[in-house]
Amino acid sequence: MRGTLMSREKSKFDVLRKIEHERHRRNWTEYTLAKNAGIAQSTISTWYRKQLQPSIASIEKICTGFGITLSEFFKEDEKGNQLTMTDDQRALYEEWIKLSPSQKRAFINLLKSMND
């Protein structure tokens, strides 16, 4: 007797759209991305022209070029929308993770008082 195969829902995450979004957010050309990621510009152009999905190794290089992690690249909210941080948000987060729990509470209280 054959086992039943579970169907997998196709991912809605659009890698090429995410790359383009990150590139435009930085006002980068394909050439700038290629240079920063160490990938040939012709490779990036081919992905878009032929609607090909880059390999994970290529996505890792792209992330390195953008200065983000794979986790940040693929992060989505609960509705499946891709999330990105601005440079200011990323800088704030990088400082936030260095704080102790009591420092985090104090900082949140400071922010709340500034918004009152």
Image (cartoon, rainbow, N blue to C red):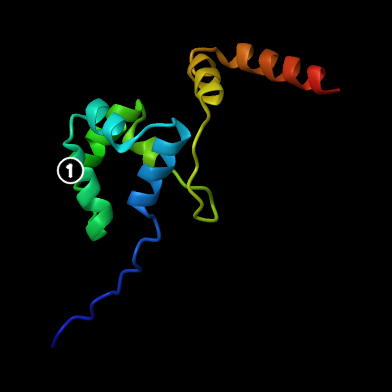
Q: Nearer the viewer, residue 99 or 30?
A: 30
The kind of residue on which mark 1 rests is Ser
- Pinpoint residue 6: horizontal percent, then vertical percent: 28, 74
Could you tell me which secondary element the residue under label 1 belongs to?
Answer: helix
Please name the residue shown 24% across and 33% down the image: 34
Residue 50 picture quarter: bottom left
Left/right placement of residue 54 relative to residue 66 reads left
- Pinpoint residue 64: horizontal percent, then vertical percent: 28, 28
- Pinpoint residue 20: horizontal percent, then vertical percent: 38, 44
For the N terminus, the quadrant is bottom left
Q: Residues within 10 Å of mark 1 (few under 14, many from 20)?
A: few
- Pinpoint residue 70: horizontal percent, then vertical percent: 32, 37
Please name the residue shown 31% across and 69% down the image: 8
Left/right placement of residue 37 relative to residue 67 reads left
Residue 56 picture quarter: top left
Residue 29 picture quarter: top left
Left/right placement of residue 45 relative to residue 70 reads left
Residue corresponding to mark 1: 42
